[in-house]
Amino acid sequence: MNPYIDHTQPIAQRAANRIKQFIDLCRRIPVTFIALIARFSIAAVFWKSGQTKIQGLAIDMVNGEFVLGWPRLSDSAVGLFKDEYRLPLIPADLAATMAAIGEHLFLC
């Protein structure tokens, strides 16, 4: 028998007490920490998307990959904007450059 469990209580009451303890434990986590984790997870998606558009510079904080070099636009990114997106107002290389810069700088 577990000395920390009151076996005189019904199972439903013990389950309710465990849930209340878990909720009380979760309330101790600062909201700012939760917000930071949420922002980082969303920013990581945009960062990874921006990394697919450039070559020569790879900074992957999740996998721990760091390749430092002079960043340049990848040919696949220009081809994507030229063939798939077919933007009518701006050239494909300008749009790909703007997308890569935006996904790296405007993370939050």
Image (tube, helix red, strand yellow):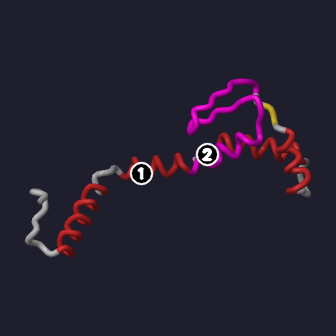
Instruction: Kindly identify the residue that appears in the image at 90 percent across and 56 percent down.
Output: 86
Left-right relation of 3 to 39: left
Left-right relation of 12 to 89: left
Q: Which residues make up the magenta segment?
A: 42-70
Element class at badge 1: helix
Residue at the disc numbered 2: 107
Marking on residue 12 = none
Instruction: Kindly identify the residue that appears in the image at 53 percent across and 46 percent down.
Output: 40
Marking on residue 34 = 1
Please provide percent x and percent y for residue 2: 13, 58
Residue lying at the far top of the rendered structure: 69
Q: CA distance from mark 1 to mark 2?
A: 17 Å
Quadrant, the N terminus: bottom left
| Residue in front for this viewpoint, 33 or 64 | 64
In front: label 1 or label 2? 1
Instruction: Kindly identify the residue that appears in the image at 23 percent across and 64 percent down.
Output: 18
Residue 15 higher or lower than 57, as above or below:
below
Instruction: Kindly identify the residue that appears in the image at 26 percent across and 66 percent down.
Output: 19
- Which image quarter: residue 21? bottom left
Q: Is residue 28 magenta?
A: no
Residue lying at the far front of the rendered structure: 1
| Residue in front for this viewpoint, 31 or 8 | 8
